[in-house]
Amino acid sequence: MQIFYIPTVFGNPISLPEEESKHCVRVLRMNVDDTLQIVDGKGTLFTCQITNPHPKHCEVKIVNEVHEFAKRNFHLHIAIAPTKNIDRFEWFLEKSTEIGVDVITPLLCEHSERKNLNHDRLERVLIAAMKQSVKAYLPKLNPLTPFSQFITSQHEQQKLIAYCGSYDEPHAKTLVEKGKSILYLIGPEGDFSHQEVDLARLNGFSTVG
């Protein structure tokens, strides 16, 4: 079934945004009484029927809605230094959406090779991945944030930092506790610097291999 995205669903019937309307009517050739699904990115999945297939404001009526669709019982925040190759970072965003990551924060680290991002483009990647994988939750994408600024202001119950500097670090799965919020840090191609790892430890992070 075709899935469309509307960030704010209000009333019944409702109209698809112009871009989604065009895709629905012109590209997919959907018509009156055809069934489609809508997600709001906040956890609700709507099943709808088309009542007016207008290519600029396709009108649909809601026939069913499921709240907290496929909701997990924990909160996962991944902070990651974007790769030099933007395609790899976009692939990460797609997979993060598929597995249900709640928050993604791009990090600017000492060894970062990528120091700027097209936030609007990355939002579109997330939305497309949400629709493609039939998810109702859109990950929150934060702005690119300096590591030193980010590391001192986080309050998740479990804070982990992936570090290649030692081979005897425990695996993340041995430290994760069921039902607790998790923050997981992933560094750039050159890994985190020693100073960054020390700062993370001072702020309650556990290093994992």
Image (cartoon, grey):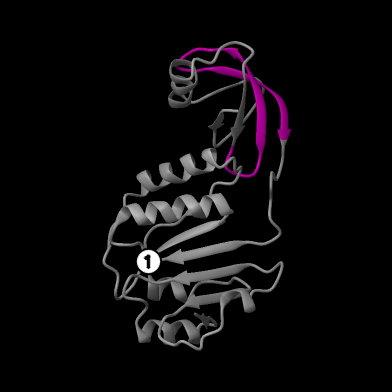
**Quick one: SS at disc 1?**
loop
142 horizontally vs 113: left or right: right
157 horizontally vs 20: left or right: right
> Which of the 4 image quadrants contains residue 81?
bottom left
How many marks do you count on the picture?
A: 1
Compared to 147, does 196 lie above or below? below
Amino acid marked by disc 1: Ala
Compared to 74, does 203 lie above or below? below
Residue at the disc numbered 1: 81
129 or 63, nearer to the observer: 129
Q: Position of residue 126 (x, y in %)?
A: 46, 46
Q: Is residue 139 visible?
A: no
Q: Position of residue 163 (x, y in %)?
A: 44, 80
9 or 184, nearer to the observer: 184
Q: Position of residue 113 (x, y in %)?
A: 26, 67
Residue at point 50%, 89% (across, down): 168
Per the rendered image, the range of residues in magenta is: 40-65
> Which of the 4 image quadrants contains residue 52?
top right
> Which of the 4 image quadrants contains residue 142?
bottom left
Residue at point 42%, 65% (across, down): 80
195 horizontally vs 72: left or right: left
Residue at point 49%, 15% (across, down): 29
